[in-house]
Image (spheres, rainbow, N blue to C red):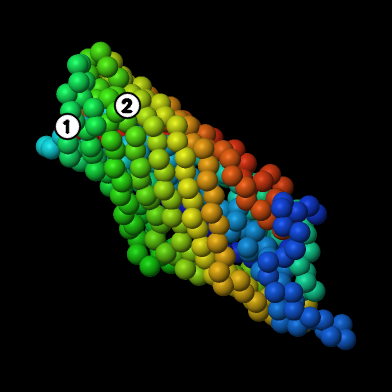
């Protein structure tokens, strides 16, 4: 998991340059000027700045998916049963993502140019932990209860990393999230559990600095915030259990991007201080669990799709908003 996040950080951190747009007809970075054949500082760095912006647009939704996953509490679709009941779990969300090959990018020092930037398939992911706390058992109704309530909390870890050409520095390594689950039906011997969940998960505010061939790029104060609602149904069959659900993810991400270029006798610096992205995606998933005496082993597979991410450059592996299949493996302890 850690390697996947590091590779995602590399994709965000390094600048790129090399012919098809994916929604943006003009560069979002300052164009600068050229006087007597000599480009201004902003014009020298515009191409690098735009490629950095596009890298951010490509990587941000992938980080959002790695954080959000599918089920709010993997393998579970029913409320816990009121006060005195708890559930804790850990999981890793992984998927075959798209990682731009920044070491193969070239840059133009006379303004932005549309390019097809090389990328490759790369397994990306993040580890997360979560807990559920029973609050209200619900109101009795025939063979079940309705309107039970659980409180949900989550924790995500982002390491501080320093390598030869990139550093990733979060303002703190741990970030906590929160949410709630409302039971439409509490699971019983004959009735499946059905619930609605809402949870917000964020990453720590992070600064990423990358250098390559005398050029540098900074993604400062990068924030990834996700919120997700789900409708989930589950049923336990003694030694195994099944759960399935559907819902929507909302990703809200922002950063301040700047680029410095020193190439071919030209030097330039430019920035986009208020880069942001908001994306909503439909998320559907299926869980299967093995119920051991003390804990559950759970596997999950799901798909996130929808929404539009626009870039000026395109990428050889496809669009940033392509449909994405993901998987999760986790352990859950309940009492």
Q: Do we see residue 72 in this rendering? A: yes
Q: Do we see residue 85 in this rendering? A: no
Does residue 245 sit above or below 199 in this rendering? Answer: above
Tag shown at residue 137:
1
Q: Which residue is mark 2?
A: 194
Earlier in the chain: of badge 1 and badge 2, it is: 1
Q: Could you tell me residue 72's position as x and y percent? A: 35, 39
Image check: 252 left or right of 134? Answer: right
- Residue pictured at 40% horizontal, 40% vertical: 229
Q: Could you tell me residue 88's position as x and y percent? A: 24, 40
Farthest left residue? Answer: 84
Farthest top residue? Answer: 190
Farthest bottom residue? Answer: 36
Image check: 87 left or right of 11? Answer: left
Q: Could you tell me residue 235's position as x and y percent? A: 31, 20
Label 1 to label 2: alpha-carbon separation? 14 Å
Which of 297 and 60 lies nearest the eye of the viewer? 60
Which of 155 and 8 lies nearest the eye of the viewer? 155
Does residue 107 sit above or below 98 in this rendering? Answer: below
């Amino acid at each position: 998991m850690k390697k996947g996040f590091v590779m995602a950080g590399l994709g965000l951190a390094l600048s790129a340059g090399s012919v098809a747009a994916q929604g943006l007809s003009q560069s979002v970075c300052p164009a600068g000027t050229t006087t007597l054949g000599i480009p201004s500082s902003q014009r020298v760095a515009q191409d690098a700045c735009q490629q950095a912006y596009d890298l951010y647009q490509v990587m941000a939704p992938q980080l959002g998916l790695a954080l959000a996953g599918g089920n709010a509490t993997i393998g579970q679709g029913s409320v816990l049963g009121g006060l005195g009941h708890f559930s804790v779990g850990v999981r890793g969300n992984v998927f075959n993502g798209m990682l731009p090959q920044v070491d193969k990018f070239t840059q133009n020092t006379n303004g932005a140019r549309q390019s097809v930037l090389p990328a490759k398939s790369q397994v990306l992911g993040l580890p997360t932990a979560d807990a559920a706390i029973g609050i209200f058992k619900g109101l009795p109704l025939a063979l079940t209860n309705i309107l039970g309530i659980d409180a949900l909390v989550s924790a995500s870890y982002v390491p501080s990393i320093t390598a030869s050409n990139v550093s990733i520095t979060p303002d703190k390594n741990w970030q906590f999230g929160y949410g709630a689950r409302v039971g439409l039906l509490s699971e019983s011997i004959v009735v499946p559990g059905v619930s609605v969940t809402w949870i917000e998960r964020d990453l720590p505010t992070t600064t990423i600095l990358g250098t390559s061939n005398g050029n540098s790029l900074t993604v400062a104060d990068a924030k990834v915030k996700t919120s997700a609602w789900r409708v989930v149904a589950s049923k336990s069959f003694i030694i195994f259990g099944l759960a399935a659900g559907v819902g929507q993810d909302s990703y809200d991400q922002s950063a301040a991007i700047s680029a410095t270029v020193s190439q071919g006798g030209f030097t330039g610096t430019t920035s986009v201080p208020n880069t942001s992205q908001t994306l909503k995606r439909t998320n559907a998933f299926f869980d299967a669990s093995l119920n051991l005496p003390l804990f559950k082993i759970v596997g999950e597979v799901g798909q996130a799709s929808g929404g539009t991410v626009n870039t000026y450059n395109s990428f050889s592996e496809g669009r940033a908003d392509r449909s994405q299949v993901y998987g999760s493996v986790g352990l859950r302890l309940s009492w």
